[in-house]
Amino acid sequence: MRTFNLLPSEAVCTELGVRIKRLRLMRNLSQQQLADMAHSSLSSIRRLESHGQAALVLVVRVAQALQVAAQLDPLFNDAVQTIAQAERAASLAVRQRARLPRARKQGG
């Protein structure tokens, strides 16, 4: 299995398209059947499988149609590894937006 951290973003998208095609074929579905299940067009499914290009909502619909949507759960979840990280995550949970970096004073 390829490590996405080491690939350019275009390669990650292409690899996801390949995986989607593999899952579709494992379930013995045609591209048209998947398009119907995902409430999408055939051309969108073709573009997703061949180039990894699609709107996020289509990726989610395809994952749901292929019954792998649960694998999206860990996406963008923060993995807490230390107590300090857990405390920081808890303090950030109440924030609504990021802070701008403070300008450093010169010549001080």
Image: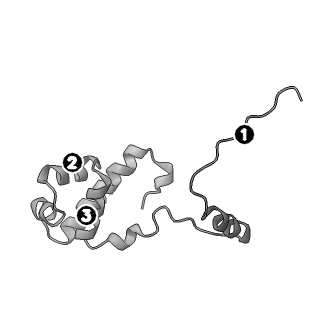
Residue contact at pointers 2 and 1, CB within 8 angstroms: no
Left or right side of 20 for 43: left
Quadrant housing residue 9: top left
Q: Which residue is drawn at 60% across and 50% down?
A: 98
Q: Residue at x 64, y 47 (%)?
A: 99
> x%, y% of residue 107?
87, 26
Q: What residue type is labelled 2?
A: Arg
> x%, y% of residue 7?
46, 48
Residue contact at pointers 1 and 3, CB within 8 angstroms: no
Residue depth check, mark 2 versus mark 3: number of the one nearer the observer: 3
Q: Which amino acid does label 1 sit on?
A: Arg
* SS class, disc 2: helix
Residue depth check, mark 1 versus mark 3: number of the one nearer the observer: 1
Q: Name the residue under label 1.
A: 102
Q: Which residue is drawn at 68% across and 66% down?
A: 85
N-terminal of the two: label 2 or label 1?
2
Q: Name the residue under label 3.
A: 61
